[in-house]
Amino acid sequence: MDEVERPIMITGNWKMHKTVEEALDFVEKLDASLNERSYRIRLAVPYTVIYPLNKQLSQTQVAIGAQNMNEASEGAFTGEIAASMLLDAGAKFVLLGHSERRTIYLETNEMIHAKLKKAVQYKLAPVLCVGENLAQYQAGQTQTVIEEQISSALKDLTEQDLSDLVLAYEPVWAIGTGESATPEIVQNVHAFCRQILASLFSDAFAQKIVIQYGGSVNRSNARHLLAQPDIDGLLIGGVSLSLENFLEIVNDNYSKNQQRV
Ligand code: PGA
């Protein structure tokens, strides 16, 4: 199969960190330090900073998004946020099914499917997060778990609906543990994800989709991960909170194609 050029996309996932002032200071300095060779950048930020960051960044190559949303359009859902509100605040994308949402807030594959459909309806680009936990990994169930997570989330949607989809593979055992999965393990799972996408849709669609890896990514493992043919980007938690560390990764000026020859 012909190889398709996919953009390398680095996403910082700030989780529940940063005040408005801290966030503005971060992006102002980030903005000033990027160059034309920096990777494509996204920041998944707390709801309270989407609007100010988007205002500050609207002319640049950094896209701001959310870490979650509700599956309803609006209504009596105290504490929740709707896709239309995220769009209104300037969000361009939304993370869906992050393992912290699945494990701490008990989000099921069905809920994630409903959220993904709603994001598609509002043209908010979805980032579907999938990944097995340690027990599943040790029991050799990675492929079964991931196949179920992907196929249930993308059920009843078309290639056209999913033209902005990004997939993020985040093994739960690697998130925040300092134990990143090896580039070889991740490459195998990403190739498998592409096979699933090809079987659900088409080869051409599967080749187009950006698949990011997340879980204890840092300056030293980032380029080894990105050197793999099916690792198209990174979803970075802890390390993305420090501007210095984040910049080292996004400004690595490292060419995947050069590395592959
Ligand atoms: P981490 O988190 O980089 O701190 O392991 C990744 C994530 O949860 O998206």
Image (cartoon, grey):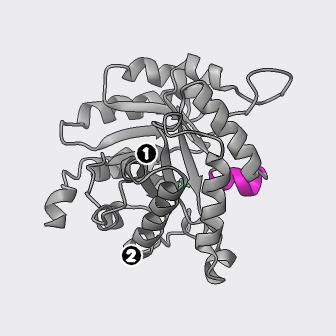
Between 16 and 139, which is closer to the camera in this rendering?
139
Which amino acid, by three-letter code, is at mark 2?
A: Glu
Residue name at image x 46 percent, y 53 percent: 236
The circle on residue 184 is 2
Mark 1, Cα crowd under 10 Å, few <14 / some 14-19 / many 20+, is many
- In the rendered image, the residue lying farthest to the right is 76
N-terminal label among 2 and 1: 1
Q: Position of residue 163 (x, y in %)?
A: 45, 37
Query: Is residue 180 shown above or below 14?
Result: below
Check disc 2 and report its element: helix, strand or loop.
Answer: helix
Residue identified by numbered label 1: 11
* Side (left or right) of 29 relative to 74: left
The circle on residue 120 is none
Query: Is residue 70 shown above or below 135?
Result: above
- Majority SS type along the magenta span: helix
**Magenta span of residues:** 98-105
Q: Is residue 102 visible?
A: yes
Between 243 and 100, which is closer to the camera in this rendering?
100
Q: Position of residue 10 (x, y in %)?
A: 38, 47
**Is residue 48 covered in magenta?**
no
Query: Is residue 70 shown above or below 106?
Result: above
Check disc 1 and report its element: helix, strand or loop.
Answer: strand
Mark 2, Cα crowd under 10 Å, few <14 / some 14-19 / many 20+, is few
